[in-house]
Amino acid sequence: MPNSSQCRALGFAVALLAAGLSASRTQAQQQSPGFAVERFYPSAPGGGWFVMDTLGMHGGLGGAMALTLGYARNPFRIDSGSQNLAVVSDEAFADFGFAVTYSRLRLYLNVDMPLVITGESGTVGGYSFAAPSVNPGANPDTLSDYRIGFDARIFGQPCGRFRLGAGAQLIVPNGHRADYDADGTFRAMGRILFAGDMGHFSYAGQLGVHIRPLDDLPAPGTPRGSELLFGVAAGSRLSVGSRWALLLGPEVYGETAFRSFFGEDTTGIEGLLTGRLEGTGEGPQLRLKLGAGGGLDSNFGAPELRILVALEIFTHHSDHGNDGK
Amino acid sequence: MKLRIEEVSKTVPNVGWQPAWSPAVPARLPVRPRRASLRPSDLHDNRRALMVPRLLPAVLVACVLFASTRASAQASPPAAHEDAELDIMHLLSHQGLHNLDDESWNVYGQFTYISSWKLPFQAPYTNANGSINSLLPGAERSFTGTFSLFFGLKLWRGSEAYFVPEVISERPLSRLHGIGGAIQNFELQKGGTETPQLYRARLFLRQTFGLGGDHVVKASDPLQLGTVVDSRRLVLTLGNFTILDIFDRNSVTGDSRQTFFNMAFMTHSSWDFPSDARGYSWGGTAELYWEEWALRYGRITPPKNPNQLPVDFRIWEYYGDQIELEHDHKLFGRTGAVRLLGYRNHVFTGRFDEAIAAFEANPAENAADCTSFNYGSKNSSAPDLCWVRRPNVKLGIGINLEQYVAKDIGVFFRGMYSDGQTEVDAYDPADRSLSVGAVARGSAWRRSLDVAGVGFGMSWISDIHAKYLAMGGVDGFIGDGYLRQAAEGIVEGFYSVNLLKAVWLAGDYQFLWNPGFNADRGPVHILGAKIHAEF
């Protein structure tokens, strides 16, 4: 039988051990390892809008290539009372997209190349964040997560009043969490897409699910698991000469975590004013897109400012309506 | 104006080999950038050893130039793609869905898996005195797996934009240590891991300005849109690429993924062209083609620290300049080419003599006590380059010959002499090198897509480089803790069997002696196997 002094010693040791375990657990929770902060997912190459999709796939075998350059200011900024930390203050990227289309179907690959990701290190709400430091010198050939996607137009004709489609994407991890360009896990998206054209008026929208295993609760501003995706776009189309068209209009899109549905800190909504000049002739056509905007609710990856420019080359068939048959 | 269809891939960087012989050869894959490495040198005294390589090029150049007749445009013979090829673009073309002759875009891909088995070898010492760069004497297996996509796009008249994402998984022998200029697998990259890594291998813009002359057909290939160009033209390239896409091409050795496994046959072992740890650089090149002549100049970025991935973009301060003169000819009716290449690097490296002097003046400045970038040696009795790195110049000059001697049989020779005063910045530790060999396609035995080859290579280090290594110094790749200086040699033979038009299975044997330029170690036997697919 242990005596009282032995009991006290044992109790002290147990207390120390418990304190140590508790401290180590707390310390582990306080370090945020990073995540894919960018929630701007460019539309499939040839998709027309920056995020939405015209569902214009038609005709025989075709394809599209796209280069999207973007800059985001403060896509991950934490405000906690008196504390204010821009963990990711500046982000620039280039996104390369390649698509093959046939009739109503599209298969595509989007590869994201971070150019600059910088920010501030610090501690907010008891959680420490290490600033990313991505630049072309230190990361000369970095590619982050890439997306493999498939879209299908299910209902409606190109240039028709209403088109309905569905799409799926697999996001393959390749970036680094510490650089805030990856979750380090596979992700997937499933979306219902719709679009239409009525005279000079065009619109598009999406509703979908982002299956995201990462849940870094309770670190502020971090992912909370799977998200609902939503967005709409509308614009007016003007003819520019006989072979070009200019479309001007806004896009609004965002996401919210199912875990805290449309919660203040788990919802990001972003708006863009966009314009695109696109060829309307037969065969390979050029599309130049410009966009500027920012977070309508600057949380959860929606930046204060976003500037986008994109160049697309896509195949355009004039046999609208018959899907190339 | 005549229309030349022969030289299809000549201007094509990397387009691997497309020898006169076989059009159908899959050889379209770009010569791979490669890996990185190191090498050393100094020259002073390897004179006797260098006598042959120095004289031989001169003799061969003289012979070729005097005997040559005016040839068609570019060196690499022709070889339009043939129906035998099975790839995406040709399938589309056959269906009437794509115009291979005037492409606005193309997409190609490749997959290559190489496995190497190093048999045990004799070595009286390994990693002596805390050095870390020995080839381990036990049996080892190494592998690389790569998957690449080649996207090409025409933006406007005369322009071509290329983007190449690539995935690599690898395990080198002895952590890529202990071999100088004859690393057994050209795909190996410094810093690679077994976990597959996706990276951007290339992203560049090419602009061609026609200057007249005949029409030359460029066949659709990876890194080449199908088009027609002038035999007199100026080609500007800007962006991210491997300098091997443009310089030191050789249609006989061609695409390394199709031919030799060993790096010694991919380019000059002693050409320390600046690049990141994967073998890619940023920069610009200009090529002037004038009938059978071509003149090239390029400036590219070096790594911030030798053999590392981060790039120094201060290209006005740190850079590698390359210049190459090429002449294409026909010798006894067979196509061939001569290329003279010179380079001058101005990069942040260390000189061997200064490292030795620093150590001798103050033994505290040894390899184990480095306070700046170093390779991790624990040898406190050895000098180290970490103490003396500063802007230094490295110079080199080389010759590259190719000649077809029979239908579908070509021979090649490369020889280069670098000054050998400074450490390897990006490629491998050799200071001087030569390689010679022959490659044959199997048309003679009714296997026209099969490829066979045999090659012999030698590389040397300068005396001051050898002294540094003998004192226990290390660089990015070699340093056994001691050295008995010798030339490193390699003999390789391979046979590649084509299956289903788009897949090749290859077997390979390499005999390597004096690994790491050390006569005390080796020889080493290495067996290899490769599966390669193009689509």
Image (tube, coloured by chain):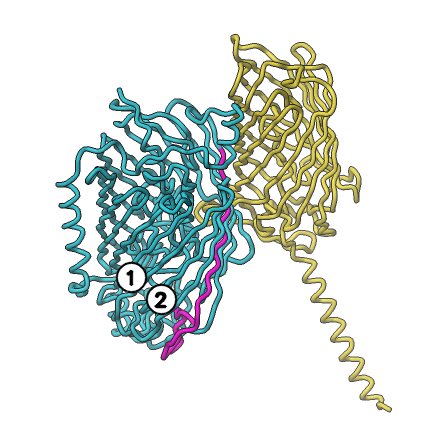
Chain colours: A yellow, B cyan
Location of residue B38 in the rendering, given as x and y in whole percent from the top left corner:
34, 59
Q: Quadrant of the N terminus of chain B?
A: top left
Please determine whether, in this image, residue A84 is positioned above or below residue B36. Answer: above
Label at residue B5: none
Q: Nearer the viewer, residue B406 or B46?
A: B406
Pointer 1 and pointer 2: residues touching (CB < 8 Å)?
yes
Left or right: where A302 falls relative to B168: right
Q: Residues within 10 Å of mark 2 (few under 14, many from 20)?
A: many
Location of residue A161 in the rendering, given as x and y in whole percent from the top left corner:
72, 15
Which chain contains the residue that carries disc 2?
B
Location of residue A198 in the rendering, given as x and y in whole percent from the top left corner:
70, 12
Q: Nearer the viewer, residue B380 or A297?
A: B380
Which chain contains the residue that carries disc 1?
B
Label at residue B478: 2
Image quarter for residue A230?
A: top right
Residue located farthest toward the right when viewing the structure as drawn: A1
Left or right: where B227 falls relative to A16: left
Q: What are the residue bounds of the magenta stretch? A: B107-136
Location of residue B59 in the rendering, given as x and y in whole percent from the top left corner:
14, 50
Residue B391 included in the magenta stretch of the image:
no
- Residue flagged by tag 1: what amino acid is it? Pro
The tag earlier along the polypeptide, 1 or 2, is 1
Q: Nearer the viewer, residue A318 or B447?
A: B447
Identity of the residue drawn at 54% across and 36% down: A95
Query: Can see residue A280?
Result: yes
- Residue flagged by tag 2: what amino acid is it? Ile
Please determine whether, in this image, residue B365 is positioned above or below residue A150. Answer: below
Q: Nearer the viewer, residue B355 or B152?
A: B152
Query: Helix or strand or loop: what does disc 1 sit on?
Result: loop
Label at residue B40: 1
Query: Can see residue B128?
Result: no
Residue located farthest toward the top when viewing the structure as drawn: A242
